[in-house]
């Protein structure tokens, strides 16, 4: 049952490492795109007070589509990648996976709530007041945040939202 949780955390760790490594190189982690003499480029933005902007990528073949590619690369720079990882981790923290079956709270001598399930999201699958269970497994938040990694060899189609 923990497979998706471990899978997603591993991918987010990889994204973090890749972004931090790229940002540690000349040019830093905040990038911009532009053109010069018809050749698109991606470059790091200067640090505050700095004036050197190392060129990171220069498209040298004059393909008119390359400017859009340069813009796309710059929009997904390491700084953004790190912000996206942080946003995803914050979302996941708000959707803790319960590793035990849900307890059935008693109401007088009568049990309320749904059946016991092997696991589920404490936020999406259980009523906080009554403990009533609405579902089980990985909630949409976990499945949706895992979807960007659907091309990974360890991704399972059963995780698809
Ligand atoms: Zn959830």
Image (cartoon, rainbow, N blue to C red):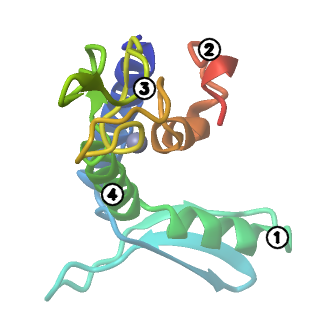
Q: Could you say which is closer to the camera, residue 101 or residue 107? A: 107
Residue 50 vertical position relative to residue 80 in the rendered view, above or below: below
Q: Earlier in the sequence, mark 1 or mark 2?
A: 1
Q: Is residue 144 left or right of residue 54?
A: right
Q: Is residue 123 left or right of residue 43?
A: left
Q: Is residue 51 left or right of residue 37?
A: left
- Residue at the outermost front position: 109
The CA span between labels 3 and 4 is 32 Å
Give the secondary structure at mark 2.
loop
Q: Which residue is mark 1?
A: 62
Q: Quadrant of the C terminus?
A: top right
Query: Do the residues under discs 2 and 4 have CB atoms within 8 angstroms?
Result: no
In this rendering, which labeled residue sits more in front, label 3 or label 1? Answer: 3
Tell me the residue at 71%/76% (across/down).
39
Location of residue 22 in the rendering, given as x and y in whole percent from the top left corner: 34, 48
Residue 153 is marked as 2
Q: Is residue 153 left or right of residue 74?
A: right
Tell me the residue at 63%/66% (across/down).
72
* Residue 26, picture quadrant: bottom left
């Amino acid at each position: 049952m923990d497979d998706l949780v471990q899978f997603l955390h591993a991918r987010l760790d990889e994204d973090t490492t890749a972004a931090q490594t790229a940002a540690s190189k000349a040019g830093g982690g905040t990038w911009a795109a532009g053109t010069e003499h018809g050749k698109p480029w991606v470059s790091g933005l200067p640090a505050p007070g700095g004036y050197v902007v190392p060129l990171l990528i220069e498209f040298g073949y004059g393909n008119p589509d390359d400017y859009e590619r340069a813009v796309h690369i710059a929009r997904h720079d390491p700084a953004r990648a790190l912000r996206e990882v942080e946003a995803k981790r914050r979302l996941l923290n708000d959707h803790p996976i319960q590793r035990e079956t849900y307890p059935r709270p008693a109401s007088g001598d009568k049990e309320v709530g749904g059946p016991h399930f092997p696991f589920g999201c404490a936020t999406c699958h259980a009523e906080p007041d009554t403990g009533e269970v609405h579902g089980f497994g990985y909630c949409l938040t976990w499945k949706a945040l895992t979807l960007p990694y659907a091309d990974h060899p360890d991704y399972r189609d059963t995780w698809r939202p």
